[in-house]
Image (cartoon, rainbow, N blue to C red):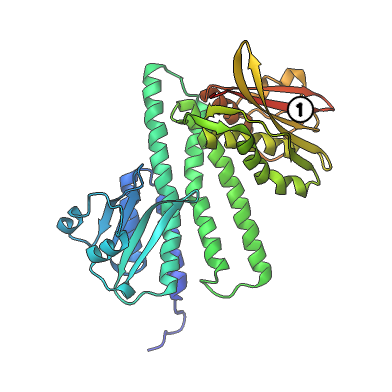
Amino acid sequence: MSPGPGFATVDPYFAQLRRLTEISRALTYTTSLDQVTRLTVERGADLLNASAAVLMLADSEGLLHVLAAHGVPEERVARFRAPLADEVVGRLQGLLGVPDDCFIAVPLIVGGAVTGLVAVATRQPSTAADETLLSALADQAAVALENARLGGEVRLDMEERLRVSEGATSAKDRALATLAHDIRTPLGAIDGYCANLQDELYGPVNDRQRETLGRVRMSGRHLLSLLDNVMEMVRLSAGVVRVEAEPVPLTEVAREAVHLLIPAADAKLQTLQLGRPTDAVVTADHERVRQVLVNLIGNAVKFTPEGGSVTVGTARRTVDGVPWGEIRVTDTGPGIADAEKAAIFEPYYRSEGTAQLPGVGLGLAISHALVRQMGGEIVVESEVGVGSSFIVRFPCSE
């Protein structure tokens, strides 16, 4: 029987997209880890008309644990509560009790790292569109789960610190952390929807539309990077950021940072080069030192005009008989006035000359906090109209 006048057949893909949007909205307002996991498996099963769904998360050692299940008897789930290190997919398929063509498992990915997985048992043989839809849900769930985990860490630590010392964490930090948390999930959903459109999940896309979708995704990722900086600053203020103490070859980590920024410098016709190598090895956290250098070199490239130069040098210094490893980032930018040299390391500070450029004024504050936490120091030497040098020093390990 065909629809009568005034009625239209609802496209099943459109209906699924609408349901995915509703799930995204629900995840946006869900901050409890337990609630996020339960919502993901329950709504995921409904979205794909699946008979069962399971969500697993990895612990600090990379072992997977079942955190939530839907449509699976508890006594069967109990046998899978122990961490799994291998044969995960095969054992999950056995838990759900479905053949290969009715089983879909997709990873949860945050920041390029796999943090867990979601698996469903479909009532009929699955399709590529089903897997794409579950992947879109997994992308949104992964962001929500990470926000719930990080939000819990920061919130609990802040509450403890506030009980010990009222006002230890500023109202501005708490407000910005809440704002960043609430914005991340819908931004992740926007990126997922754009990816689905680019993959033509909902119909053909022409070249002009594909290019526009790419720009939307790029803009969203830029905003996510700003939110990540806000959350990083809040975690540093709350004291929940941990750093390693390991041998770090300065020339090696400087070379890594330079290679990451060469495309940005080339785009502005700048010369970005690494000076003479040194054998200095310091005690610090390799990944965090690289993060600091990427911030410093990125700032140098951003503020230096086209055709300018940025040089990264490493050296070994002895101060009062103590050996230090030093990295110096020097640019030919506008320079920094003496009155601003202390303020530039304050969170959210934007000088008059940089207010029109993108950013929230956290890069130097984060770098300063990380360097101090690793037992080092960061100073600036600058002359207006000539350029600036940011010097980072750490104790040598040998």
The quadrant of the rendering that contains the C terminus is: top right
Determine the image quadrant of residue 139. Answer: bottom left
Q: Is residue 24 among the parts visible in the rendering? A: no
Q: Is residue 75 left or right of residue 336?
A: left
Q: From what the image shows, is residue 200 above or below residue 145?
A: below
Q: What's under tag 1, amino acid-wise? A: Ser
Residue to which mark 1 is pinned: 388
**Residue at 49% of width from left, 55% of height from top?**
189
Near-viewer residue (207 or 293): 293
**Residue at 69% of width from left, 34% of height from top?**
277
Determine the image quadrant of residue 250. Answer: top right
* Residue farthest toward the top in the current orientation of the protein: 320
Determine the image quadrant of residue 128. Answer: bottom left
Q: From what the image shows, is residue 155 above or below residue 271?
A: above
Location of residue 88 in the rendering, given as x and y in whole percent from the top left corner: 30, 59
Location of residue 227 in the rendering, given as x and y in whole percent from the top left corner: 55, 41
Q: Is residue 115 among the parts visible in the rendering? A: yes
**Residue at 69% of width from left, 27% of height from top?**
390
Near-viewer residue (112 or 163): 112
**Residue at 30% of width from left, 46% of height from top?**
34
